[in-house]
């Protein structure tokens, strides 16, 4: 009996203690996290992490201070893959966002759900000058002349190298538009001359990078010209461009000049950490990493275009990143507020600050004239590379994204195939398996949505 | 046991109640209304959140679902056929079996070891008993974070130890086999507190007279363990095995935090596969078929194991 | 017991010590790294660096960790109260009331123990969505208001109550609620506390369901809060993450050590009687 009383005593103490801490914190945070009473709450879902999240929150604060009608409430919703389905699953409930960030490859799917208000509606109402937004990025999120969503964080896949290390070991840096062979050379020299202290290179196991190998080789991943001329009914993961790239990686792995960091968020933070500490020489990644790779990095950062196969011209890569969408399950007033917020994020000043802090490209054409961006280009000329790569790309059907629903599945499957290839599996076999699974998925999906019998 | 509450209300009050309500046998006539009132809430909750969803899952598993999750095309058992034909799904099933089996065996073995160590009569043994039960207070995400650090490349403890001893550095979470080892080890560690508490309790209940008798006959400690201890705690071992088995089949949190099903789907266990197909790619029909398979496996195993072991355990 | 000489004793303590290290190792490492600056951890310098509570300050100020704790506390407390109440009412019906189909109904409830909640998340999510309960405490509590395990466990406990008590109560003319409230509950107090402890821990450890149904820090419980912290860190900020994990593990460890006795009793009742 005594023990019981003692127990309840402890429990009560614990409950009271934690409650006090908790409520104390809750009241402290209330001002930041919750909507102010006389303002309309605009729920905003995003998937930004690290420095990009910090900058985005700063921009949100800026918007909230800039007017008194709306209060944008940001919520981090995990990675890109998780967020798409969350948006679809919550549509029509009070939990759903008014404005949300969703990745490039979800465009076709979101457009088809009928859950969104195309930003075109407000562009027309406000006579918003769409021309100020970079055409390459804008086209990616438009369909038949209607702007579905607003491109926001836009990046290009690029090759990063540690210029200081290359100089130290007397290695000629890779050219601006390198071939696979160029990269192999640098990786081999780095590994050999540093006596394996520096790992030559890596390519994260990431479906996005796989897609870019195809894009830069000028090959289609889905039929109907990557979905630009109709609903795709099958996919092709085993084109020469895909096989060449995978063989290239596998050979370099076997030679010991390539390190496998795996897949997922951990892989990216691990390869970044290794690169910053001078243990990794080169890697392919989003230009959005520039911010992280330049702050506090004692070594000079080198940037080149995404590599292409030997003997072929680079076809150019598609943009990556995400755009901002409006949900149609909110009142007109809320949607208007969400649109005002989007406009705020797209101003020349916001976009310049965004590029400086993150490495995502400033999409407002007038950002280039802002002092912030000019200072950045002066200080780190290499940061011009991704923008130049985007401008140098002549848009065609293989480098403007894939208009196919279920691309998350495509990424899962190609990533699995990449993992198998990195572990030594035959590229053609691994990719054929993934291709069959994806084609069957596409056909089922077409049937379920009534596009195809 | 003493009661602090007065067990009965005052007689006068009781009498007034008695007048209104028929007693004894007659009282049973009303039992069904009382039972309805007492059991009703539980039945409603179980009905809405356990029985209905099971039927609904079965229903959904027979359809293709469109991009907003509605079942649109009836396909019969095709979703199941697709799964059985898919090498990826078979691999997921196989990985689950390997994981579950290893977790159950290791948890029980180490659990018995801990319990045996803790029944010794030594000074300060209470401290060890408390320590051995500690992981029961560890939730899944805490366990995942602790172990994630241990297994993490370059900064993690294991890689640092390996480097300082000039052993080859293992990429724990990015090599298929080792990633499986990593999540098994983490799961077993997390299970140990609970397992220890039960097994320790069971060992304490074994009458010391049995050991004394065995000792008189000159039985070795090994013989005592195999012929006295094990038979005596076998009902408890059976209970623990079942609980651990079912828990392992349902594993999700550790996988999600440590490996996200990778590398190369090596740790893509059944529940994780359901999550992926339903909540990442919106393929609800297929995910429902996977859920049904999972449910049948768990229900079946629980039942079979129960029936099978029931006959073999010794009840005193 | 046989006589133990000193050398044996050393070996025994050594064995115990090794086992204790196996269990405590990850805790110690977690607590230790939570005291180190992340820069030191990243360099792999786990010893010799400066030690401070800075990571705890960062966790409390920069993250919503305390809010997560509060959410978990609310959810677990509500779940616990509801489970103890509904399970005991249900168990009462199975032990003290006679009605048609009692046995069959009991087996139906037992059968729910075989149906894994993990396999039912798709329709349950749809239900939550339909009733607009997503991202709210309600949906984190409602599915767990009762449990087949709880009913089963309390039924076992209530069966230990002597038949004379029931007869006496009938003679006294107690109605079922009075008998339940004034006799049964106090009698089975230990089992109730055990069930409460289980419900609390079970709710506290929920991971998948809250992950699917919460979308903001206002309602996100602590397990998913840690997931949230981990996925937001692009530069594995190990020091702060470990500090958050330690903050999260402390309350349950305290509950465990204080309530150890009850866990043992309850567990062994469940184990020997199943």
Image: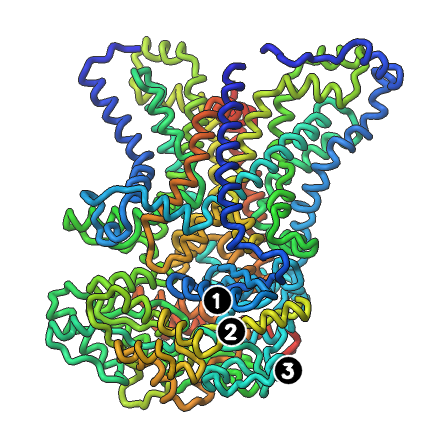
User: Is residue C43 placed above or below A397 in the rendered structure?
Assistant: above
Is residue A144 or residue A21 the one in the foreground?
Answer: A21
Label 3 Cα crowd, 10 Å radius (few <14 / some 14-19 / many 20+): few
Is residue B82 or residue C27 the one in the foreground?
Answer: C27
Q: Is residue B66 visible?
A: no
Reading the image, the residue beneath label 1 is A62
Q: How many marks?
A: 3
Dot 2 lies on which element? helix
Q: Is residue B309 left or right of residue C154?
A: left
Q: Are discs 3 and 1 both within one chain? A: yes
Q: Please tell me which of labels 3 and 1 falls first in the chain.
A: 1
Q: Is residue C86 left or right of residue B239?
A: right
Q: Name which residue lies at 38% across and 87% down.
A: A391
Callouts 2 and 1 close, C-beta under 8 Å:
yes
Chain bearing tag 3 is A
Reading the image, the residue beneath label 3 is A125
Dot 3 lies on which element? helix
Cα separation, mark 3 vs mark 1, equals 24 Å
Is residue C46 or residue A430 the one in the foreground?
Answer: C46
Q: Which color scheme did the rendering employ for the protein? A: rainbow
Reading the image, the residue beneath label 2 is A344
Dot 1 lies on which element? helix
């Amino acid at each position: 009996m005594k023990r019981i009383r003692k127990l309840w005593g402890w429990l009560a103490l614990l409950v009271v203690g934690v409650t006090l801490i908790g409520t104390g914190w809750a009241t402290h945070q209330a001002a930041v996290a919750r909507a102010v009473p006389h303002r309309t709450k605009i729920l905003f879902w995003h998937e930004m992490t690290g420095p990009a999240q910090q900058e985005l929150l700063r921009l949100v604060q800026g918007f909230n201070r800039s007017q008194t009608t709306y209060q944008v409430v940001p919520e981090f919703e995990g990675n890109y893959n998780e967020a798409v389905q969350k948006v679809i699953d919550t549509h029509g409930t009070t939990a759903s966002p008014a404005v949300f960030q969703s990745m490039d490859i979800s465009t076709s799917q979101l457009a088809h759900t009928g859950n969104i208000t195309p930003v075109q509606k407000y562009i027309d109402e406000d006579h918003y000058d769409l021309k100020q937004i970079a055409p390459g990025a804008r086209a990616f999120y438009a369909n038949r002349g209607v702007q579905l969503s607003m491109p926001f964080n836009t990046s290009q896949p690029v090759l990063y190298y540690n210029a200081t290390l290359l100089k130290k070991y007397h290695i000629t840096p890779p050219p601006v538009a390198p071939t696979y062979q160029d990269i192999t050379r640098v990786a081999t020299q780095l590994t050999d001359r540093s006596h394996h202290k520096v790992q030559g290179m890596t390519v994260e196991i990431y479906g996005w990078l796989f897609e870019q190998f195809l894009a830069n080789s000028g090959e289609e991943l889905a039929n109907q010209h990557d979905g630009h001329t109709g609903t795709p009914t099958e996919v092709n993961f085993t084109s020469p461009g895909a096989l060449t790239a995978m063989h290239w990686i596998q050979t370099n792995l076997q030679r010991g000049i390539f390190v496998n960091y795996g897949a997922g968020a951990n892989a990216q933070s691990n390869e970044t950490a290794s690169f910053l500490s001078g243990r990794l020489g080169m890697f392919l990644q989003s230009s959005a990493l520039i911010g992280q790779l330049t702050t506090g990095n004692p070594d000079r950062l080198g940037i080149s275009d995404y590599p292409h196969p030997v003997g072929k011209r680079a076809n150019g890569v598609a943009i990556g990143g995400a755009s901002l969408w409006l949900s149609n399950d909110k009142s007109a007033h809320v949607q208007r507020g969400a649109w005002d917020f989007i406009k705020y994020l797209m101003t020349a000043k916001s976009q310049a600050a965004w590029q400086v802090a993150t490495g995502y490209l400033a999409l407002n054409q007038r950002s280039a004239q802002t002092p912030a961006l000019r200072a950045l280009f002066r200080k780190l000329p290499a940061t011009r590379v991704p923008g130049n790569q985007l401008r140098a790309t002549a848009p065609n059907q293989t480098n403007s994204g894939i208009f196919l629903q279920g691309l998350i599945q495509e990424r899962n499957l190609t990533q699995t195939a990449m993992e198998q290839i990195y572990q030594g599996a035959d590229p053609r076999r691994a990719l054929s398996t993934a291709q069959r699974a994806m084609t069957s998925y596409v056909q089922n999906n077409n049937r379920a949505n009534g596009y195809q019998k | 046991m003493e009661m602090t509450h007065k067990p009965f209300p005052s007689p006068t009050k009781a009498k007034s109640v008695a007048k209104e309500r028929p007693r004894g046998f007659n009282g049973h006539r009303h039992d069904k209304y009382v039972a309805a009132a007492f059991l009703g809430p539980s039945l409603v909750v179980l009905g809405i959140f356990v029985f209905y969803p099971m039927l609904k899952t079965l229903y959904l598993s027979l359809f293709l679902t469109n991009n907003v999750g509605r079942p649109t095309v009836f396909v019969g058992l095709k979703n199941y056929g697709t799964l059985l034909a898919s090498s990826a799904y078979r691999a997921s099933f196989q990985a689950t079996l390997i994981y579950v089996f290893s977790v159950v065996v290791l948890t029980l073995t180490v659990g018995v070891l801990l319990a045996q160590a803790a029944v010794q009569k030594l000074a300060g043994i209470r401290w060890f008993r408390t320590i051995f039960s500690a992981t029961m207070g560890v939730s899944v995400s805490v366990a995942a974070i602790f172990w994630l650090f241990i297994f993490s490349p370059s900064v993690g403890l294991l890689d640092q130890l390996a480097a300082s001893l000039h052993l080859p550095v293992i990429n724990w979470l990015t090599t298929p086999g080792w990633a499986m080892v990593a999540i098994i080890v983490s799961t077993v560690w997390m299970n140990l507190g609970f397992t220890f508490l039960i097994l320790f309790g069971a060992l304490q209940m074994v009458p010391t007279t049995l050991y004394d008798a065995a000792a008189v006959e000159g039985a070795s400690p090994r013989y005592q363990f195999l012929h006295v201890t094990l038979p005596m705690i076998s009902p408890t071992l059976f209970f623990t095995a079942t609980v651990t088995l079912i828990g392992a089949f349902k594993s999700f949190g550790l996988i999600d935090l440590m490996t996200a099903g990778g590398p190369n789907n090596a740790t893509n266990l059944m529940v994780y596969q359901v999550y992926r197909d339903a909540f990442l790619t919106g393929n609800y029909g297929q995910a429902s078929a996977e859920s049904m398979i999972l449910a049948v496996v768990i229900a079946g195993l629980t039942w079979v194991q129960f029936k099978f072991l029931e006959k073999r355990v010794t009840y005193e | 017991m046989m006589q133990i000489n000193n050398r044996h004793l050393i070996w025994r303590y050594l064995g115990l010590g090794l086992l204790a290290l196996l269990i405590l190792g990850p805790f110690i490492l977690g607590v230790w790294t939570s005291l180190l600056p992340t820069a030191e951890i990243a360099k792999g310098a786990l010893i010799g660096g400066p030690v401070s509570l800075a990571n705890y300050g960062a966790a409390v100020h920069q993250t919503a960790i305390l809010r997560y704790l509060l959410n978990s506390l609310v959810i677990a407390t509500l779940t616990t109260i509801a489970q103890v109440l509904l399970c005991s009412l249900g168990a009462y019906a199975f032990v003290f009331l006679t009605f048609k189909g009692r046995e069959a109904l009991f087996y139906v409830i037992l059968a729910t123990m075989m149906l894994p909640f993990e396999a039912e998340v798709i329709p349950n999510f749809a239900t939550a969505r339909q009733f607009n309960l997503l991202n709210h405490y309600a949906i984190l509590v409602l599915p767990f208001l009762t449990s087949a395990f709880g009913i089963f466990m309390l039924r076992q406990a209530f069966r230990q109550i002597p038949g004379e008590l029931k007869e006496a109560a009938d003679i006294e003319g107690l109605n079922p609620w009075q008998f339940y409230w004034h006799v049964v509950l106090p009698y089975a107090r230990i089992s109730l506390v055990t069930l409460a402890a289980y419900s609390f821990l079970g709710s506290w450890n929920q991971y998948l369901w809250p992950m699917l149904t919460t979308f903001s820090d206002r309602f996100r419980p602590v397990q998913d809060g840690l997931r949230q912290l981990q996925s937001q860190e692009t530069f594995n900020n190990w020091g702060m993450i470990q500090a958050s994990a330690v903050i999260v593990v402390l309350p349950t460890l305290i509950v465990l050590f204080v309530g150890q006795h009850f866990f043992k009793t309850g567990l062994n009742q469940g184990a020997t009687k199943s």
